[in-house]
Amino acid sequence: MRKMLMLAAALMIGGLTWSVPGIADVMSLRGDKALDAKATAPDRRRQVTDDEGFKRDWKEQPPLIPHKIDKDQVTLDVNTCMRCHGPDTYKEENAPKVADSHFIAADGTKMETLNMRRYFCSQCHVPQLDAKPLVDNTFKSN
Ligand code: HEC
Ligand code: HEC
């Protein structure tokens, strides 16, 4: 009986070590840095810009931002994106007009002013970096 129990225990432990990856296989996000060591700043990367704009990967994609936005501000008081993309200014600035969909309320009615759900532009529109994706992605565009 005791032998059987020991055998069962040995099998269980064997099973456990088989299914759980060894600690050595798990790569920490901090690389090989010790937990109490100071983190190093990630590499600085250059933003990718494009005067022609970026191709959309699917029809309803919020277009990617093809220019620098370091100096832009979207706060309670000011939205500098609208200085170029607003319906009154876009022609003069030679910029694409903010989409008509951004002036439609949740109930479908057309609004005179920008729908506040669209106020924080960079919630949906983002600049691009040439960086290796952190996780694999099998998304295929339409
Ligand atoms: C100084 C004027 C100016 C400002 C400010 C500005 N943009 Fe632009 N934006 C442009 C122009 C011009 C283009 C056309 C492409 C180009 O020339 O870079 C453009 C292109 C875009 C596009 C691509 C549209 C498409 O259909 O491909 C997006 C998205 C965009 N801007 C978002 C923003 C957001 C968000 C902000 C604020 C954080 C902003 N822009 C601030 C002038 C501006
Ligand atoms: C909730 C997400 C969201 C927010 C917030 C948002 N957008 Fe968009 N935007 C989109 C989507 C999705 C599209 C593409 C589909 C469409 O045209 O509605 C788009 C399209 C655009 C286009 C291209 C229009 C065209 O005719 O090709 C511009 C320019 C733009 N947005 C500017 C802005 C600016 C400037 C702001 C901030 C004031 C903003 N957007 C806020 C989602 C968003």
Image: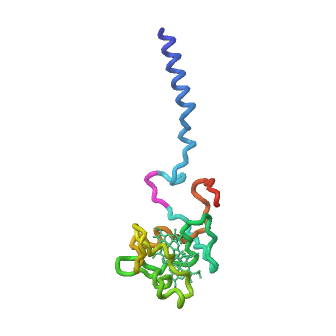
Q: What residue appears at the point 49 percent right and 76 percent down from the top-left corner?
A: 100
Residue 18 percent across, percent down from the top left: 57, 31
Of residues 7 and 56, the one drawn nearer to the viewer in this rendering: 56
Q: Which of the pair 38/55 is nearer the observer?
A: 55
Q: Position of residue 121 (x, y in %)?
A: 46, 73
Vertical arrangement, residue 82 with respect to residue 30, above or below: below
* Residue 19 in the image: above or below residue 90: above
- Quarter location, residue 115: bottom left
Residue at image x 43%, y 75%? 110
Magenta stretch, overall SS: loop
Q: How many marks?
A: 0
Image location of residue 114, percent across then percent down: 42, 77
Q: Against 35, is 115 above or below?
A: below
Of all residues, the one furthest to the bottom in this rendering is: 92
Which residue is rendered at x = 43% and y = 69% of the image? 108
Magenta segment, which residues? Answer: 35-39
In the picture as drawn, the residue positioned furthest to the top comes out as 1
In the image, residue 16 lies in the stretch drawn in magenta: no
The residue lying at 54 percent from left, 71 percent from top is 127
